Amino acid sequence: MFNAFMQDQSPFKKKLMMMVLLSVVSVGSSVFLSQIYSTKIAENEHQKAEYTAQSNWFQKFDYKDATKLYNMVLKPCKLSDIDSVQSEQLSLLKTHNLTILSVKNDAPTDKPDKKIPVKYRKSTVVLTGTWNDLMSALNEFEKNHLVVITNSSFSLNDEKSSSASGLMKATLEYNIYFQ
């Protein structure tokens, strides 16, 4: 029976085969389009939930607290103010009874690098003082300006006199960021 059907050359068989082929393509297309439709519905539901959450957050957003927080964030100084920031940092160290032995300022960076996207000037300070004075100065060092300590080392100032005087020698490397 199947062999007879395959050998049939009538127009009815051609139309029947065309209808079967169209039916298979239609079913495949409807499954494919149904899959796309369900994916789009899931995406829309996800976006709706996200927009609702953002809307709720935005309605509860407190502008006064955000403004206070923004004002608390330290910002880079201007290039013209970099020397005054440096002198303020050095005077801060002096107010904590630290003796500044040397200060070395590198040239400001012309272009920020990939790791640090803001321009800066690297400085190195060598100073002496007691441990408590050093720690109190370091606690205040990064509070007033966008100054970040990148490296530090501490050692006894003098092997013979350190036990009696309690002085420590510290080397601080820090960046002063500017615009």
Image: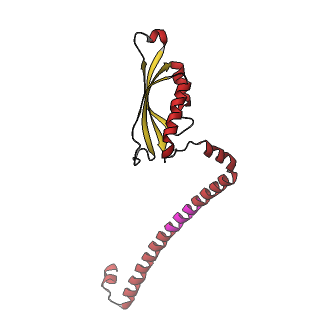
At 65% from the left edge and 56% from the top edge, which residue is drawn?
A: 55
In the rendered image, residue 38, in percent from the top left (x then y), is placed at 53, 65
Q: Is residue 81 left or right of residue 64?
A: left
Q: In the rendered structure, does residue 40 fall within the stretch colored magenta? A: yes
In the rendered image, residue 11, in percent from the top left (x then y), is placed at 37, 91
Above or below, comparing residue 69 to residue 96 in the picture: below
- Residues drawn in magenta: 36-45
Magenta span main SS: helix
Above or below, comparing residue 55 to residue 23 in the picture: above
> In which quadrant of the rendered view does residue 156 lie?
top left
In the rendered image, residue 27, in percent from the top left (x then y), is placed at 46, 74
Q: Nearer the viewer, residue 37 or 47?
A: 47
At 55% from the left edge and 29% from the top edge, which residue is drawn?
A: 92
At 50% from the left edge and 67% from the top edge, which residue is drawn?
A: 36
> In which quadrant of the rendered view does residue 124 lie?
top left
Q: In the rendered structure, does residue 157 fall within the stretch colored magenta? A: no
Q: Nearer the viewer, residue 27 or 108?
A: 108
